[in-house]
Image (spheres, rainbow, N blue to C red):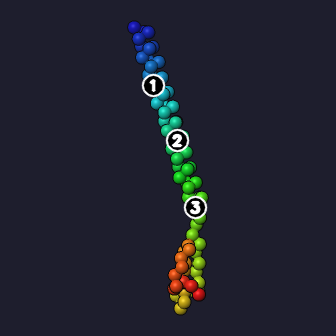
Amino acid sequence: MIFGFLKKLIKYYIDKLVDWMRMVKFDLELETQIKKYHDSFVKKEKPKIIEKGTFGKDNWSISIGDIDDKDTKD
């Protein structure tokens, strides 16, 4: 009777250990994916913002990125 109880107790704790190890593995994989996702943003160039003139005045314009608009050229 006592050996059956010990067997079940050991199995219970082994199952808990395996579940914990799976969660740790999942957390590490998730952190790796998040880091890759954030690194993908760092590699991209940020758009160049060019503001000409004073806001609200005549001939004011703003350009974001490589835009070739006739309105934004001097």
User: Which residue sits at x=55%, y=45%?
Assistant: 32
Residue type, numbered disc 2: Glu
Who's the residue at 44% across and 9% down the image?
A: 3
Q: Nearer the viewer, mark 1 or mark 3?
A: 3
Residue drawn 54% across the image and 79% down it: 68
Mark 1: which amino acid? Asp
Q: Earlier in the sequence, mark 2 or mark 3?
A: 2
At mark 2, the secondary structure is helix
Rendered location of residue 53, percent (x, y): 59, 86
Q: At which x and y percent is residue 42?
A: 59, 58
Is the N terminus in the top left, top right, bottom left or bottom right quadrant?
top left
Query: Residue 54: x percent and y percent?
Result: 57, 86
Q: Circle 1 is placed at which residue position?
A: 15
Determine the residue positioned at 56% across, 85% down: 73
| Residue wearing tag 3 | 44
Q: Which residue is mark 2?
A: 29
Answer above or below: position of 12 versus 73. above
Q: Amino acid at mark 3?
A: Lys
Residue farthest to the top, as pictured: 1
What is the C-alpha distance between the residues marked 2 and 3?
Answer: 23 Å
Earlier-in-chain disc, 2 versus 1: 1
